[in-house]
Image (cartoon, rainbow, N blue to C red):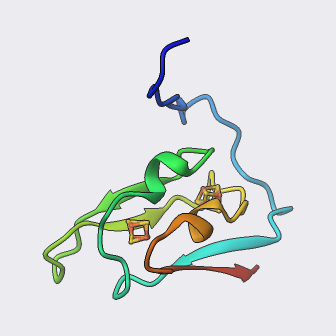
Amino acid sequence: MKKDIAIRHDLSKAPKTGTWRYMHPDVDKKKCIGCETCVPFCPDAAISMVKYKDESKKKADVDYEYCKGCGVCAEICPVKAITMKKN
Ligand code: SF4
Ligand code: SF4
């Protein structure tokens, strides 16, 4: 088995999240250092890096249509820029 292979979801075929999601991640754009650590850890490929006009670095952005609220991103973020909040 090869190592270091990331499995990429095809979001066009992925099921959208329903109203059952209990928690959602909230990204504090001021705390986010743009390290991209959270991106490959999201099991639903729901995080992308977005460049905002007032920021020099790209910041993590969650697609809530596909995020399942698992909390992995909040756990893995090295600067605790993501907080899980109840819906
Ligand atoms: S809570 Fe889970 S599914 Fe949602 S963005 Fe974070 S890692 Fe991805
Ligand atoms: S892991 Fe944290 S600091 Fe790094 S891009 Fe994601 S939210 Fe930003």
In the image, residue 22 lies at what x, y percent? Answer: 83, 70
Q: Does 21 sit left or right of 76 as displayed?
A: right
Residue at 73% x, 60% y is: 70
- Residue 86: image quadrant is bottom right
Residue at 61% x, 68% y is: 75
72 or 60, nearer to the observer: 72
- Residue 35: image quadrant is bottom left
34 or 22, nearer to the observer: 34
Q: Residue furthest top?
A: 1
Figure check: 79 above or below 77: below
Residue at 43% x, 79% y is: 79
- Residue 21: image quadrant is bottom right
In the image, residue 15 lies at what x, y percent? Answer: 71, 39
Figure check: 10 above or below 81: above
In the image, residue 68 lies at what x, y percent? Answer: 71, 56
Question: Which image quadrant shows ligand 2?
Answer: bottom left
Q: Does 84 sit left or right of 4 as displayed?
A: right
In the image, residue 31 lies at what x, y percent? Answer: 37, 85
The C terminus, quarter of image: bottom right
Residue at 45% x, 72% y is: 78
